[in-house]
């Protein structure tokens, strides 16, 4: 197909050469160059079985092989040799092919009337040819690069799958580099997540099975590949959830809950954030009311995270619609801890805690945030709720019997409500009133 397309281009050039020959002085048998009067040549091209340059104005006898030399951009011709195969990669067009290709053009195209017009037309066609060849070369180069990327991807996947049986750490190092680069591409991301064996082996690399000093580095890079392949890639998220067992998700949240490397947590949270774009995953694992919800894992682990990991948790909460409009607008100026505090405060003063255990978890995390960072302030609505909740717990103790554990928790709650969120000086009196009940 490529030869056929370029052949049609050359056929137009050949027609122009015929036009140029028609303009030459046919009464003479020699043509002399206008720039060098001593440079003369036959008016009729004298072919042989070797390629020869067709000079300006020369008539070309029928039945020859004619070509445009790609290297010199000069037209050349020779006798047809049936036994010769065109293995050099040059473009060759027979005279019969030229006549057939130009038949329509000769009927509709006005022939040039001067040598200058011919020269300009030839120059224009040569420039078009150059542009066409440039485009073909770039297209070929792109295809080669795509094939190279595909081959490199295939080799890297094989190395990861074979590790450590048939590949060593140095091979794994290079393979992870390649997969990390390609994981940012949407198509490769979808392809990686559809390969459950690849992800199983990436997950195995994150375990403690690799006895190598660089194990932590490999672990973090494996998680990074997973996270990058899922980022803004709905097809990849769907693939992963369809191909991986529920234990995969359990493993991710176990990594978050453990006090491990800040980088590891950040990478795992990147995976969770990518999956959170999937409605099924969000409703099953990141909903307050789902029996399989893991959102409390994020709540419980938040205060022990690095600032970068905390920011990723807030990103997840934002994707879940937990942030107010003002908080979304001020994300660049608000600290993650302040937004986290606001989320927990709203959950409490809107009485959305599902049970006493969730209530205590939310209040405990609020205490940790506000104890460690005095710049984070409670809202007025939360302060009002604290006062009402304190009175409610006093009233409950007065009305009914409560366990010693509940009584002790209520005492601590009253102290914290005053010392952390309210007026520390009023804590003693409030506690005395509670004990008298």
Image: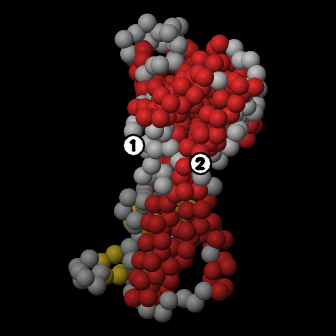
Residue 437 is labelled as none
* Location of residue 399 (image quadrant): top right
* Location of residue 355 (image quadrant): top right
| Residue 79 against residue 335 in the figure, above or below | below
Element marked by disc 2? helix
Specify the quadrant that holds the N terminus: bottom right
Q: Nearer the viewer, residue 212 or 83?
A: 212
Point 43% across, 92% down: residue: 114
> Residue beneath label 2, please?
381
Q: How packed is label 2: few (under 14 Cα within 10 Å), some, or many (20 or more)?
A: few
> Residue beneath label 1, please?
375
Residue 46 visible, this angle:
no
Point 55% across, 62% down: residue: 6
| Residue 411 against residue 41 in the figure, above or below | above
Q: Nearer the viewer, mark 1 or mark 2?
A: 2
Q: How packed is label 1: few (under 14 Cα within 10 Å), some, or many (20 or more)?
A: few
Residue 24 x/y as whole percent: 42, 86
Point 70% across, 39% down: residue: 351
């Amino acid at each position: 197909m490529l030869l056929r397309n370029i052949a049609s281009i050359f056929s137009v050039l050949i027609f122009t050469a015929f036009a140029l020959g028609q303009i030459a002085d046919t009464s003479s048998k020699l043509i002399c160059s206008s720039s060098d009067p001593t440079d003369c040549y036959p008016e009729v091209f004298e072919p042989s079985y070797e390629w020869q340059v067709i000079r300006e104005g020369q008539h070309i006898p029928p039945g020859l092989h004619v070509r445009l030399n790609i290297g010199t951009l000069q037209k050349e011709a020779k006798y047809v040799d049936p036994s010769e195969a065109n293995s050099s990669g040059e473009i060759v067009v027979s005279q019969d092919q030229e006549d057939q290709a130009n038949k329509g053009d000769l009927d509709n195209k006005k022939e040039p009337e001067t040598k200058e017009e011919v020269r300009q037309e030839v120059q224009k066609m040569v420039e078009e040819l150059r542009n066409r060849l440039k485009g073909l070369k770039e297209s070929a180069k792109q295809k080669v690069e795509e094939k190279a990327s595909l081959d490199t991807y295939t080799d890297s996947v094989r190395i990861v799958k074979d590790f450590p049986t048939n590949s060593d750490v140095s091979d794994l190092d290079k393979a992870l580099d390649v997969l990390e680069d390609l994981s940012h591409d949407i198509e490769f991301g979808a392809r990686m997540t559809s390969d459950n064996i690849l992800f199983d082996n990436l997950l195995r690399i994150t375990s403690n099975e690799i006895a190598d000093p660089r194990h932590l580095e490999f672990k973090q890079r494996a998680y990074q590949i997973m996270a990058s392949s899922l980022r803004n890639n709905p097809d990849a998220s769907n693939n992963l959830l369809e191909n991986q067992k529920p234990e995969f998700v359990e493993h991710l949240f176990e990594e978050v809950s453990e006090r491990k490397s800040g980088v590891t947590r950040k990478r795992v949270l990147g995976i969770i954030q990518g999956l959170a774009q999937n409605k099924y995953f969000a409703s099953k694992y990141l909903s307050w009311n789902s029996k399989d919800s893991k959102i409390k894992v994020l709540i419980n682990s938040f205060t022990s995270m690095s600032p970068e990991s905390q920011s990723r948790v807030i990103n997840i909460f934002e994707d879940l619609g937990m942030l107010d409009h003002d908080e979304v607008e001020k994300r660049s100026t608000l600290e993650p801890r302040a937004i986290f505090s606001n989320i927990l405060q709203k959950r409490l003063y809107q009485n959305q805690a599902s049970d006493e255990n969730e209530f205590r978890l939310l209040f405990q995390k609020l205490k940790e945030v506000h104890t460690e960072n005095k710049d984070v302030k409670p809202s007025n609505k939360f302060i009002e709720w604290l006062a009402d909740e304190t009175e409610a717990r006093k009233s409950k103790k007065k009305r009914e019997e409560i366990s010693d554990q509940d009584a002790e928790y209520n005492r601590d709650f009253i102290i914290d409500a005053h010392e952390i969120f309210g007026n520390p000086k009023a804590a003693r009196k409030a506690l005395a009133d509670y004990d008298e009940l």
